[in-house]
Amino acid sequence: MTTLKEYLDSAGCEPMLSDLIILIAAQAAPIREAFIDNQSYAGTENTSGERQAALDVWSDEHLTKVIEESGLVKELASEEKSDVVTFPGAKGNYAVVMDPLDGSSLIQVNLCVGTIIGIYDNGKALSRGDELRAAMYMLYGPMTVLTISVGKGVYTFAMDKSGEYRMLEGPVKMPEGKIYGSGGLNKDWTATHREFIESIEAEGGKLRYSGSFVADFHQILKYGGIYCYPATIDNEIGKLRLVFEANPIGFLAKQAGGAISDGKNNLLEISPEKSNHKTPIYVGSEGLIKRLESICGR
Ligand code: AHG
Ligand code: MN
Ligand code: MN
């Protein structure tokens, strides 16, 4: 079976990018090991005002250290940090954006969570999603799975017991499908969001919503459908973040033939205003995103 390194070489990745991807992907092993000692809440809040789990903090500090020590990265933006961090001595010109642990409310119930990563080669962490050089996530489920795109389709790998990633599937094509899930309390949905969800339900849509964006997206990548965290009547910017969540996942969706939108705009074309820029998110099969945009555009 093809290893991650063999795949990156065959995809024509420059050696520094390949080294950076392999280094970050390898951190899935220590992060997974840290679950058992980091089950509680940390007693602190992140820049979005959300309670931090101990594992959010641990993963952020661990990845930050590894990324800084690589000497390859000039800027780092993390969901757990208020500002972009710069590493002026770096020899490489990469910028990394990360959600060190996505789905943190599920840590204590042992459901699937993951780490989301985006890599730019322009040295600027606050760049548009369509400028990403690579995006990936590591999923801590029954297997440790890496889903990656270096701009040449989407490939999945599983970590074996020696720590080597071996290819599972690729290029992955997201089908049109009927899986859907939506965040935000039903009572607070807008009329357009409700109309869109009802249109999916009317044709036999199947509800799947776990509380982990990355895990819910992984299912949609395979089976097709849509993940939504919409604007609501009491919160028009939604909950999720453009830089660390929407853009890397949107890049992967696009590479698999899907799309991402806030209802009106392709999120990959939006310039972030700040590190924790929030946005409504709809990501999934292309046909459903087209339908959404036609409902929202009326
Ligand atoms: P994070 O754990 O990185 O803060 O992200 C949580 C996100 C996302 O993973 C998930 O889909 C969503 O928040 C769940 O929010 P609700 O509990 O409001 O549904
Ligand atoms: Mn998240
Ligand atoms: Mn997170």
Image (cartoon, rainbow, N blue to C red):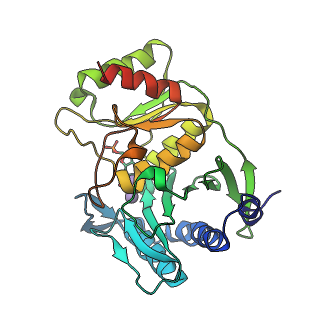
* Residue in the image at 28% along x and 54% along y: 277
Q: Is residue 178 visible?
A: yes
- Count of marks, rendered view: 0
Q: Quadrant of the C terminus?
A: top left
Q: Position of residue 152 (x, y in %)?
A: 66, 50
* Residue in the image at 53% along x and 69% along y: 31
In the image: residue 222, left or right of residue 11: left
In the image: residue 220, left or right of residue 188: right
Q: Quadrant of the N terminus?
A: bottom right
Q: Position of residue 225 (x, y in %)?
A: 52, 29
**The image quarter in which residue 17 lies:** bottom right
Q: Position of residue 68 (x, y in %)?
A: 47, 81
In the image: residue 6, left or right of residue 213: right
- Considering only vertical position in the picture, is 222 above or below 141? above
Query: Please, which residue is most extreme toward the front here?
Result: 122
* Residue in the image at 53% along x and 24% along y: 178
Query: Please, which residue is most extreme toward the right here?
Result: 1
Q: Could you say which is closer to the camera, residue 205 or residue 74? A: 74
Q: Position of residue 255 (x, y in %)?
A: 59, 43
Query: Please, which residue is most extreme toward the bottom here?
Result: 89
**The image quarter in which residue 267 lies:** top left
- Considering only vertical position in the picture, is 210 above or below 88? above
In the image: residue 81, left or right of residue 254: left
Q: Is residue 104 visible?
A: no
- Considering only vertical position in the picture, is 175 above or below 19? above
Query: Please, which residue is most extreme toward the top here?
Result: 202
